[in-house]
Amino acid sequence: MASIFVVSAERFIPLFPRLACQGVLLGCHPCFRLNMFSKGTKRKFSDGDEEISDESLVGARVASSYSLQRQSLLDMSLIKLQLCHMLVEPNLCRSVLIANTVRQIQEEMTHDGSWHMVAEAFCSAGQSPSERLVATEVLCRSREQDAEPKLFSVISYEGCREEEVVADETLCSVSVSDTVSNVCLAGRIGQCWEKSELSGVERDEEALEDSRLGSGEDEEIDTKDRASTESPKTIGQVFGTFEIKNGSPGPDSALEELFSDVDTSYYDLDTMLTGMQSAPKMGPYDILDSLAPSHSSPSIVSTPNCRSDLNELDHIMEIIVGS
Amino acid sequence: MGEDSESPKINHSFLRDYVTEADVISTVEFNQTGDLLATGDKGGRVVIFQRETESKGESEELGESGEYNVYSTFQSHEPDFDYLKSLEIEEKINKIRWLPQQNAAHFLLSTNDKTIKLWKVSERDKRPEGYNLKDEEGRIKDISTVTSLRVPVLKPTDLMVEVRPRRIFANGHTYHVNSISVNSDGETYLSADDLRINMWHLDITDRSFNIVDIKPANMEDLTEVITAAEFHPHHCQLFVYSSSKGTLRLCDMRESALCDKHSKIFEEPEDPGNRSFFSEIISSVSDVKFSHSGRYLLTRDYLTVKVWDLNMEKGPVETYQVHEYLRSKLCSLYENDCIFDKFECVWNSTDSVIMTGAYNSFFRMFDRETGRGVTLEAWRENSKPRAVLRTRRVYTGGRRRRGDVGVDSLDFTKKILHMAWHPAENIIAIATCNRVMQ
């Protein structure tokens, strides 16, 4: 119950000398970043399967574990930002802090050369990290192959907006089937990420296979013209690194797209952060509805290279997205 | 448990049997003499408690003081709706500040997210009786029945406390007001929201003066917000504001009209050993308070309280760990949003002890002279008046004592966010609130 508790504090002060030095706080063991995540998050570690034959793999595992954790933190942050649209104006301080965390992660991923990890992912197809990270139930993931595609969900926000054609059938078919089996209410949001993963995978595969930079043959969602701002933003760097096809979107376009409403006339962070929307408030489940493909098929058709492999997959994707 | 006697002094008989979310207390404040204690809650109500003066000699010997009983209750703010943005405006009282008393009436400022109100609290214990033309109930008398004239006299009646809104300072803020602070000049006060700080004159409601504006031209560039602000207790031109990046800025209004450029900035360099993705979030300052002397600043961030000397900008002079055992839990605290909790901190009357809240109904006190800290629990269940508050310990390793609480069994819904310390005596007011389903 809510209550006011008024006490006389006089007696507290003489107590101080009688306290043992240990008092309240014992030394905190140095927490490097892995430990930071090692408690409290819902995760499954399945160490049993993998045999570590190569010592270098251990290092790679540690690194990939860290990147998994970082990825899950990023996903969690983005979800938090998305769910900000409530009846009451969202807490600006909280939104700014979360947004800064997102920027920090993406900056680090750029500098870390996540690109390198991505390349690795495709080169060593058989590698499946034993450590798995399921950050929150919302994401509803339980597949091991998520490790690599997860890295893409960061950068391919556009995928959330439209139905995406998928490139790698092997990768995606597994994902798709698992998604279907893991459907739950909250998991619908996870499907949004699902699509973005797949689209990201597709893009990257294209870049790898075709060795083309910004081929420009597909026009992704970039239905709006973004004037790039001069100050180099980390999001822009990430985009530049992965050479996303849709030219050079504005440095913050990914972040903005995520933040902005379905109503494509609102793009800036201001809109999100101040909760100013002309559209009626969206609940968390409305987000998914808004993600249903609202764009015409030309954007989907725009990846001719992959089309031939994807008819079946495309069909499944349509079912999931629920068009 | 009997050697010391602490006591919860509130008479709660007025509370209803059921408690709702609207009853959650959101702010606590003593007035300048400590005789009155105001609390604001989520439902927009303000409850004022008054200290009963005990004239009995024996209570003085024990060193105890009078109880606080309900003095007045009034609805300060109502839920509102911003039609332009299609957003609700909460009626939750964010802050209450008393004005220095100038006459028999008391004045306080209360604010929700958008609107600040000045309330006059006055007592009435007399009323005129013996009117010639009206009878006791106020009905007009028949002239023919009046046979003689008399002078109305004031007769004592039961004490009535009247609370009236005297000023309403509206439409000054686009963002959520987080702090108000009355100036030592007695005429002005400041109100701070996430991006701006305004200065108002207590008598003027249709204008306010913007003294700090950190809103970037492009909102996408926004990375820092204002979290708290306060005027200096003695120098009417100085005020301080804290940010979500852990910086404090001292501003002098004599330097320029718009104090975007600070006079001093207090910032502690980041400890590279403790760096993580949460470093910035936990460095965000949730509360800032000047010491009574005006020489020091007290700040609270997520894991520590720090004392700063106004003369030294490069770092705090004292740092106290509030709950360092949570450092390894930051990820899950981020997940459940607890990492964004805003704890308040307070000085005692002599600036020798500082206090702040924590989780599990614990709160912490630090003696600045010895540097020692103690954990205490605020609980009302079965607490007799003048019962001792238990010293608690959170078990983080080593030998476990009976009564120690493990870190994993801390209840993060029981958080002590709001508190106040009597300006002269060692009496503290702590708001405890559990989440209760209606």
Image (spheres, coloured by chain):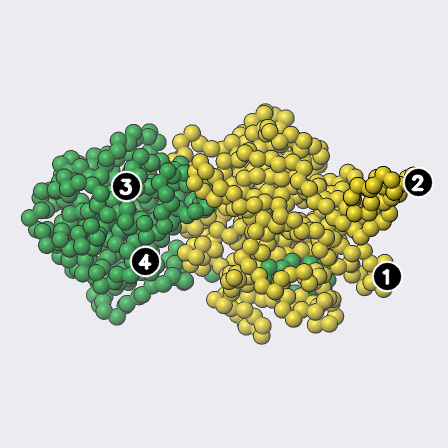
Q: Mark 1 is on which residue type?
A: Lys
Q: Earlier in the sequence, mark 3 or mark 4?
A: 4
Q: Chain of mark 1?
A: B
Task: Give the number of the mark in front: 2 or 1.
Answer: 2
Q: What shade has chain A been given? A: green
x 21%, y 34%: residue: A247
Query: Residue A11: x, y in percent?
Result: 73, 62
Mark sitting earlier along the chain (2/1): 1
Image hue for chain B? yellow
Distance CA(mark 1)–CA(mark 3): 74 Å
C-alpha gap between disc 3 and disc 4: 28 Å
Chain to which mark 2 belongs: B
Which residue has dot 4 on it? A186
Label 2: state its secondary structure: loop
Measured as percent of width and height from the top left, residue B357 is found at 59, 56
Q: Do discs 3 and 4 belong to a common subunit?
A: yes
Image height of B348 relative to B254, above or below: below
Mark 4 belongs to chain: A
Q: Which residue is mark 3?
A: A238
